[in-house]
Image (cartoon, rainbow, N blue to C red):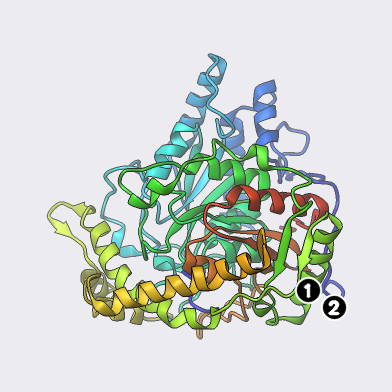
Amino acid sequence: MDRRNFLLNGSAMILTGTAAFKKKAESGKGSGLPPFDATLAELQSAMQSGRMTSHSITNHYLERINRIDKKGPALNSVIEINPDALDIAGSLDDERKHGRFRGPLHGIPILLKDNIDTADRMRTTAGSLALVDFPVMSDAFIVRRLREAGAVILGKTNMSEWANFRSTRSTSGWSGRGGLTKNPYAPDRNPSGSSSGSAVAAASGLCAAAVGTETDGSVISPASVNGIVGIKPTVGLVSRSGIIPIAHSQDTAGPLARCVADAAALLGALEGYDPEDPASRKNGGNAGYARFLDPGGLKGMRIGLARNLFGFHDRVDALMENAAAVMKSCGALIIDPADIPNIDSLGGLELEILLYEFKTDLNRYLSKRKAETRTLSLEALIQFNERNAEKEMPYFAQELFIRAQAKGPLTDAKYLKALMTVRRLARQDGIDRIMRKLGLDALVAPTDAPAWKTDLADGDHYMGRTTTPAAVAGYPHITVPMGFVFGLPVGVSFFAGAWSEPKLIGMAYAFEQATKARKRPEL
C-alpha cells in the first residue's frame, strides 16, 4: 500500500530504443543461457528445442541473483532463495521429456513477494522479523495455481515492510528482515513499493517474471518506476487467500514482467475461482489472454485523457502528450479532457476503511499462523516492534498499526458509511460516470513521477500518481513503459471498469509494440 499520492539530455522523451533482446547477459552470451530480456515465449522455444532446460535457466537466474543482487550493485531485491528450485526445475524437465507440457509457464522461474504464503522451506514474513518463526501451513491459492501451471518458484522478494502499512513516514523498499532494495536505474533512487523487490527483480533479469500485490499502487507504482509492465487486476479476478492482507475491499495480487505478453500470461495462470475468497465468485475466467495481444488493439478505441491526474511533473506531462499522439496514430480516438469526478474526495475515506479492514483481516490471517503454543495478532505485533525497535523501527514508527488497533469491528456504522460512500465516489460517481458520459473504452494518465532519492530520515517523496481511483473502485489498471525523464523510467496507465482486463491488455500491448519504449537498466 502506497500512502501518498545520469542526465540524458535535459528533456523528456519517448525512447524508441533498439531491437528487443539485442544485448545478452554477460554470462549468457554465446553459452546457451537466456538473454537478459528473454520472454516467456523465447524461453519456452529454447526448452522445446533442447537448447536450454528449466534446470539451466533456473541456475542462470540463481547465478545472476548472486552476481548482481547479492554482490556487484547489490540491488537486494531477493529476500530468500527456494532451496528446492533446481530440483523442481529438474522434475519439470523430466515431465517435458515424457511428453507432459503444462502450458506457457512450464519450467519458468518466477519470484514471489514475501507476503505470499508458500508451504515449503521458505518463510513468508511481509518483511517483518515478527513472522520469521511462524510457519505457513499451506500454499496460497495463487501459489497452487502457479505450481499446477509448471512454474518454478525461484524465491521470495523483499518488500516495503507490511506492504507500506505500518507508518505514514515509511521508506518504500525497506523491511526489517530484508533491508533496503535499490532502484536498478539509479541505486540512490527508490524502487517504490510495496512490491519493490518483485519489480526490481523483474526489471533486472533476476527471474522470468514476478508476482506482487497491491492495495493502492503497490504493483503499478514500482512497475512504472522500474521500467516494466504491471497489472493490477479487478478485485476478485485473483484470489487473496494465503496472502498477508491489508484490506479485502482493495487487495489483489498481480504480475510484474518486462513485456505485456509475459504479464498477461502470468495473469492467466494466477486467476481462478477460490471458494476461500468469496470475491472470486465473480470471476468467470478468460482461458488466458494471448488472443488479446493485438498490435491493432488501439484501433477504434475511445480513450479519455484524465487530465486531473496530470500536472505533477512537467516532463512527465510532455511524455504523456507524446504517448497520446502515439495512441492516436494507432487509430485511437482521443477524448480530451476526460476528468474523473470526485477523485479529491477519496483519500481520507480510503485510509479510514483500510484501518478498519487491516485490523480485522490481519487478525484473521494471523490466527492461522502458529508456532508451538504461540499465536499472533495485531496487538502482539505492536508489542514485538516495541521490544525490537532497534531492528524493526530504526527509521520510522508504527502509527498506522496503532491507529488500526484502536478501530472497532466491521459492523461499526462509521466504517459501513465510509465504505458505501467511497465505493460510490470511485465507481458510479467516478470512473463509471465519466466513461459512460463520454463513451470511453479506457482512461489514460501518466502513472507516476520518476523515482525519488531514497530518504531513510524523512521517508518517501511522492510527487503524484494515478493509482487511487482504480484501486479504491477495485477496477483493473495496467502500466506500460512510455519513456524516460533524466534516465529514469516512467509509465503510462490504462484503466477502466470491472473485468475489462482483455480490452486493457490489448490496448497496452498495441502501445508497447508501437513505442518499444522500455530500455533495460545498464547494470
Q: Which mark is residue 22?
A: none
Q: Is residue 119 left or right of residue 430?
A: left
- The residue identified by callout 1 is 486
Compared with residue 20, is residue 471 higher up or lower down, i.e. above or below?
below
- The three-letter amino acid code for the residue at tag 1 is Phe
Q: Is residue 226 visible?
A: no
Residue 493, percent from left and from top = 66, 64
The answer to whether residue 80 is visible is yes
Q: Nearer the viewer, residue 181 or 108?
A: 108
Q: Secondary structure at mark 2?
A: loop
Q: Nearer the viewer, residue 163 or 157?
A: 163
Q: Is residue 27 left or right of residue 71?
A: right
What is the total number of numbered labels drawn onto the structure image? 2
Closer to the N terminus: mark 1 or mark 2?
A: 2
- Image check: 469 left or right of 244? right
Q: Residue furthest top?
A: 98
Camera-side residue of 71 and 189:
189
Disc 1, SS: loop
Vertical side of 398 occupied by 431: above or below: above
Displayed quadrant of residue 148 = top left
**Location of mark 2 (residue):** 10
Residue at position x 58%, y 76% in the image: 454
The answer to whether the residue labelled 1 contacts the one labelled 2, judged by CB atoms less than 8 Å apart, is: yes
Most extreme residue toward the bottom is 458
Spot occupied by residue 288 in the image (x, y as percentages of width and height): 57, 37
Whole-percent x and y of residue 354? 37, 72
Name the image quarter holding the C terminus: bottom right
| Residue at (48% x, 78% y) in the render | 346
Mark 1 → mark 2, Cα distance in angstroms:
6 Å
Residue under the image location 80 percent in, 53 percent down: 516
Q: Position of residue 498 (x, y in %)?
A: 52, 56
Q: Residues within 10 Å of mark 1 (few under 14, many from 20)?
A: some
